[in-house]
Image (cartoon, rainbow, N blue to C red):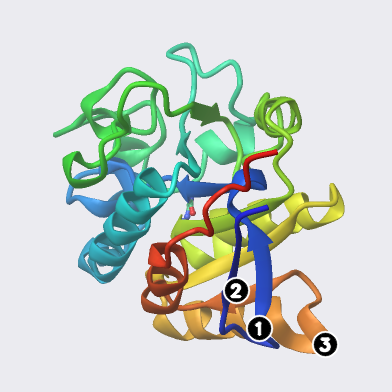
């Protein structure tokens, strides 16, 4: 056991590094850069940039602590056959999912906009989960990957707090995973939704999980794990 303990809402939480994964949700150019899906929905994409440095710090500390890092991307097949019609047909036809934009076809796999932002690029060996929905468990093999690795606790960060992060945390919580949401490593186009979404996680005794800051998690994970006893 290489247990870490972190200050969190609604109360401090301990977790074993060996059975913990960091899940980085949808830190894609389509959400964080101008001309992508987030902008097409009418949002100010600069509001998400506050999450980049804290998410980067979480990725670095997780890699150093041998914690599995998993990245997710929201997007669709190029024929859009995995996209519900109501999702495609929303909004200005020139800016819909599948329409051509400055970063390629909006929210389509393989296009430049679908890529994870270069600051947080995955490295070899880190699973990337391509998901057609908001939740990372829906129509993906995330649960299978986590179970095969014996993962029990998820450190969750990314964008947006109240949409894909929240949906994923709700899915994970119902599947028996303990979720610790990294507050400043998440962001929303709506700062008030970000704040309330975090409160919703920790309310009612931690109805969906815990909320902790990246600084507290980095400190907890940087502590030297006790030397393994030699049997
Ligand atoms: N990744 C994610 O949160 N997808 C969204 O569509 N988010 C919005 O806030 N629109």
Residue to which mark 1 is pinned = 12
Residue 201 placement (x, y as % from top left): 68, 76
The answer to whether the residues at label 3 and label 2 have Cβ atoms under 8 Å apart is no
Residue 99 in sight here: yes
Residue 117, image quadrant: top left
Residue 179 placement (x, y as % from top left): 67, 61
Residue to which mark 3 is pinned = 204
| Residue beneath the point at 19% across and 45% down | 35
Which label lies toward us, 1 or 3? 1
Of residue 15 and residue 36, the one placed in the foreground of this image is: 15
Which label lies toward us, 3 or 2? 2
Indicate whether 1 appears above or below 118. below
Residue to which mark 2 is pinned = 5
Q: Name the secondary structure under disc 1.
A: loop
The answer to whether the residues at label 1 and label 3 have Cβ atoms under 8 Å apart is no
- Packing grade of label 1 (10 A; few <14, some 14-19, many >=20) is few
Q: Earlier in the sequence, mark 2 or mark 1?
A: 2
- The answer for how far apart the CA atoms under marks 1 and 3 are is 15 Å
Residue 130 placement (x, y as % from top left): 51, 27
- The answer for how far apart the CA atoms under marks 2 and 1 are is 7 Å
């Amino acid at each position: 056991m290489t247990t870490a303990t972190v200050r969190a809402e609604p109360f401090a939480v301990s977790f074993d590094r060996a059975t913990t994964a960091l899940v980085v949700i949808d830190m894609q150019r389509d959400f964080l850069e101008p001309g992508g899906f987030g902008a097409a929905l009418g949002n100010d994409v600069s509001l998400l940039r506050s999450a980049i440095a804290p998410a980067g710090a979480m990725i670095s500390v997780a890699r150093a602590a041998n914690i599995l890092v998993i990245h997710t991307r929201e997007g669709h097949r190029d024929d859009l056959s995995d996209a519900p019609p109501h999702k495609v047909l929303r909004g200005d036809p020139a800016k819909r999912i599948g329409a051509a934009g400055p970063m390629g076809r909006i929210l389509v796999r393989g296009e430049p906009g679908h890529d994870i932002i270069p600051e947080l690029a995955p490295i070899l060996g880190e699973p990337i989960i391509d998901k057609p929905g908001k939740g990372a468990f829906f129509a993906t093999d995330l649960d299978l990957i986590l179970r095969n690795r014996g993962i029990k606790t998820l450190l969750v960060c990314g964008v947006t707090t109240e949409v894909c992060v929240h949906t994923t945390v709700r899915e994970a919580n119902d599947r028996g995973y303990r979720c610790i949401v990294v507050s400043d490593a998440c962001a929303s186009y709506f700062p008030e939704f970000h704040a309330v979404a975090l409160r919703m996680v920790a309310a009612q005794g931690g109805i969906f999980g815990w909320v902790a800051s990246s600084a507290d998690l980095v400190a907890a994970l940087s502590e030297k794990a006790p030397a393994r006893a030699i049997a």
